[in-house]
Image (tube, rainbow, N blue to C red):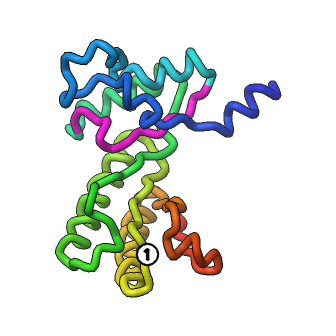
């Protein structure tokens, strides 16, 4: 019982398996032996962990039938997806370009809807630098995303990254609750 309680506090990211996940970018790589849909079962069997965090780029599709299959594979593994990590490259809430920021918001809203389809309670956004000169617009973008998530019972999360202004100044924080 104690081990199960401890393991129930842990989630494993599919990012940890990047080198062995099969992908369209590396179709003939013999080291890539793990299908993403098999990851929840493998993680449950091998590590006893039933909380999985997928990278958005690991999804082979966002079609409703595929998302339904992801949800079913999680169910079969007696697991859940605790978070989807959104890494959109240059698209983040701190970008000074308002068009790129709107693209970030729109794409994040789509992934919030995908999270709902899978039964995932959280998405993690790439906050960018959160530098003082973009902070006001970044907070506005995050509020828009957070409000959208709240309406769908999906929390929007951030993480500390390197030497961002947020980590250099721990008194500044953003909280978005579902």
Where in the figure is residue 75, as x and y percent of width and height?
47, 25
Report the residue at 41% width, 46% height from top. 84
Number of marks:
1
Quarter of the N terminus within the rendering: top right
Left or right, 165 with respect to 49, comes to: left
| Circle 1 SS class | loop
As drawn, 68 above or below 46 = below
- At x 64% / y 80%, what residue is drawn? 171
- Which residue is rendered at x = 19% and y = 28% of the image? 24
Q: Which residues are magenta?
A: 49-61
Q: Which residue is mark 1?
A: 130
Where residue 170 appears, as percent x and y from the top left, is: 63, 75
Quarter-wise, where is residue 62 in the image? top left
Residue nearest the viewer, comparing 171 with 42: 171
Above or below 128: residue 78 = above
Image position, residue 106 (x, y; %): 24, 64
Give the residue furthest to the front.
163
Classify 10 Å Cα crowding around label 1: few (below 14), some (14-19), many (20 and above): many
Name the foreground residue: 39 vs 92.
92
Residue sitting nearer the eye, 128 or 149: 128
Please give the name of the residue rendered at 43% of the width and 28% of the height, measured from the top-left corner.
17
Residue 99, placed above or below residue 160 = below
Q: Is residue 40 left or right of residue 66?
A: right
Residue 72, above or below 80: above
Q: Residue furthest right?
A: 2
Q: Is residue 44 magenta?
A: no
Residue 132 position within the rendered picture, expressed as x and y whole percent measured from the top left? 44, 85
């Amino acid at each position: 019982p104690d081990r199960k309680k401890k393991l129930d506090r842990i989630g494993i990211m599919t990012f940890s398996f990047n080198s062995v996940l099969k992908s369209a970018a590396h179709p003939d790589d013999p080291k890539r032996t793990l299908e993403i849909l098999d990851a929840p079962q493998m993680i449950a069997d091998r590590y006893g962990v039933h909380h999985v965090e997928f990278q958005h780029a690991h999804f082979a599709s966002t079609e409703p039938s595929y998302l339904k299959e992801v949800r079913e594979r999680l169910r079969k593994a007696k697991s859940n997806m605790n978070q989807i990590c959104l890494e959109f490259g240059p698209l983040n809430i701190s970008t000074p370009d308002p068009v790129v920021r709107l693209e970030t918001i729109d794409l994040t809203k789509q992934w919030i809807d995908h999270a709902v389809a899978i039964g995932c309670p959280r998405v993690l956004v790439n906050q960018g630098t959160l530098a003082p000169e973009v902070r006001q617009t970044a907070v506005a973008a995050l509020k828009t995303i957070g409000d959208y998530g709240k309406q769908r019972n999906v929390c929007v999360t951030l993480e500390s990254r390197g030497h961002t202004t947020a980590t250099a100044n721990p008194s500044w924080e953003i909280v978005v609750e579902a």
